[in-house]
Each structure stands twice: as C-alpha cells, then as structure tokens.
Image (cartoon, helix red, strand yellow):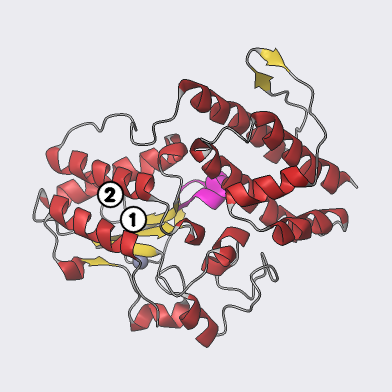
Amino acid sequence: MSSAPADLLQFRADARTVTGLGAADVGIVGDGAHQKTGGYHEGKDVLVTIGRYHAPATANVGSGGEDYSARQARDRNGLTNSASASDVGSQWPHGGRAAWLRWNNLLYAEMRDHQDRLPALRAINVSLDGKTKKRFDQLRRDDGLIASTDTVDTHTHLELWRDTEGNRKITLDRIVTLMRAAVTGTTPTAGTEDDMTPEQDERLKNIDTWLRGFIQGDAQIPLQNQGKTSNWPNKTGAKIDQIATKVGIDPAGLGQIEAAAKAGAGEAFAEQRQALIDGIVAALPQDKDGTLGIADVRAVLVDVLLHGAAA
Ligand SMILES: [Zn+2]
C-alpha cells in the first residue's frame, strides 16, 4: 500500500516544529478521495489499481492514459509505492493564517524566480490571497499561475518529482526555511543551502537562457562559455548515457525520445522534451563531481533535441 517515504516524514516533523501544526494537518499519503483520482499523494500500487499506470516505465511516456503524476519520464522512472506530495494546513498555531499566506507567497515567488533553490519541487496548488485557488507547475512555467480545483483555500499542496525521493533535502529544507521566515515575518536569506559555486551559478544561468531560446524556437542563441562564444560540439552515445544518469532518465527512455523526434511525433516529443529540459536544469546544480561539463550538456541537447527534431 502507498506509504510516506522517510524524507517526507522528516519534512512533516520539521514543518510541524516551525508552524505548530498537528500531525493530521500535514498530510502525505492520500485519503479515499485522493485514491479515486490518483496524483502525487499515491504510489504505484494505487495508480495500477485504478488503471492509471501501465508498465514498463520506459513505455507510455507522455501518454494521456497515464496518471499525470506518472506521465513524465522522471516520474515513471522514480515511481514506487511512496507518496510524493504533502498537504500543509492553513491554521498555523505559530503566526496563524497570516503566516500561512506569507509562506504561500514566498513559496510561489521562489519557484518563479529561483527555481534552482527548489529543484525537486514540481508544482504547488496554492492560494496567494486565501480565496483564489491556483496552481504553479514547473513543467509549464510559461503558463504562470493557473486555476486549480484543489481546496487550497484551507491547505497548500506540494508535489515533488518522484525520482527525487531520498535526494531532495535541499528542496525540503528550503521550504521549511521559507516557513520560518513567514512565521517570523522576516525576509528569507538567499538560498545558501545549495552551496553552488559562482561558476555553477553562472553555468545554470547560461544554460537556462539557451533553453528558453530553444523552447521559443530560436535554437541559434549562442551559449557564452567563460566570456567566449563557443561552437557546439557534436558528441553522442556515451554522453547521452551520462546525461541520462544525471537527470534520472534511463538511456532506453532517452533513446525513445530521440526516436520519437526522428519519427516526427510532434506532441509526444514536445512533452518528453520538456521533461528532459526540466530534468537537466534541475540536475545541474548537483553536478559536483566534475565529470560533466557544460559542453557535454550542450552537445547532448543539440544532438537529441535539435538534430533529432530536424531529421
Ligand atoms: Zn494535496
């Protein structure tokens, strides 16, 4: 049966300490209502039972027949019986509903402006004013805040990418840091938890700029590398495998993406491409072993996305 993973249990404990909420006010595993609709509060067993997950993980990526929480490659690859969401109630003993609203606004602003500080957080269902119900999804950043039917005038819903289980302390700790700032009415300090070097920070900005250009259809934006505009190297094979490992997509899944691109499977490819881009962006700050350079990232992006799409 679907269960709460250790890191979300720790998050719940931390969130309760800061907000004063009771155990029942910070949820993880779905109740009956959730089980009928799937989503990140459920694990693989429930999704299979309700017919919203069809193995294997490498098939059906992007398919509307799969639950939205098990549709992207990285969610399918990370799918276990663990829930991958949390609901935080609005009645905070520490600071009250006003503090909860401040936290909602801090959280949304952080997702919008500093995605790198919350790499494991896919989406939130949130109310910024206590009445209007909204959703912000990193998978669809360009859509901004969209309408939600979730009852987020009384709680906040957090969704974590399923492949981040056990490896998302930076994100969960940052969410708690924002809670603390909301309770005390202070401005949170810049994200020091991710201990990125200035070079890594700069790399992330560069790749992000290039990716934005790519998404908008202009793949000719040159990537600045230490002040110089470099040519795109052309490497495949081992580098694709390396990227796949970094971003949590298995090589077979990437092979499918490339094949889909070459076959001109437009929409399916676009959906997988977005998952890949999100995965790469999310993975870059954690690239600390020095084996994966920006040239490698660029090469894989060009080979898989640009050349693949044009073939
Ligand atoms: Zn929820």
The stretch in magenta equals 136-145
**Residue 296 appears left or right of 116:** right
- Ligand 1 is within 8 Å of the C-beta of the residue at disc 2: no
Could you tell whether 273 is left or right of 152 in the image?
right
Q: Secondary structure at mark 1?
A: loop
Residue 80's x, y, as percent?
48, 72
* Residue at horizontal 68 percent and vertical 33 percent from the top: 213
142 is within the stretch colored magenta: yes
Q: Quadrant of residue 48?
A: bottom right
Residue 300, image x and y in percent?
A: 74, 41
The answer to which of 3 and 154 lies nearer the viewer is 3
Where on the image, by quarter, is ligand 1?
bottom left
Task: Report the amino acid beneath label 2.
Answer: Asp
The residue that disc 1 covers is 132
The answer, for residue 267, to whether it is visible in the render is no
Q: Is residue 143 magenta?
A: yes
Report if the CB atoms under discs 2 and 1 are less than 8 Å apart: yes
Residue type at mark 1?
Answer: Thr
Q: In which quadrant is the N terminus drawn?
A: bottom left
Q: Which mark is residue 129?
A: 2
Label 2 – label 1 distance at C-alpha: 6 Å
Q: Quadrant of residue 211?
A: top right
Residue 275's place in the image compared with 155, above or below, is above
Mark number displayed over residue 168: none
- In the picture, residue 178 is in which quadrant? top left
| Nearest to the observer: residue 151 or residue 36 | 36
Q: Is residue 73 left or right of residue 181?
A: right
Rendered position, 6 above or below 100:
below
Q: Is residue 47 visible?
A: yes
Q: Position of residue 311 (x, y in %)?
A: 91, 47
Q: Residue furthest right?
A: 311
Looking at the rendered structure, the secondary structure element under dot 2 is: loop
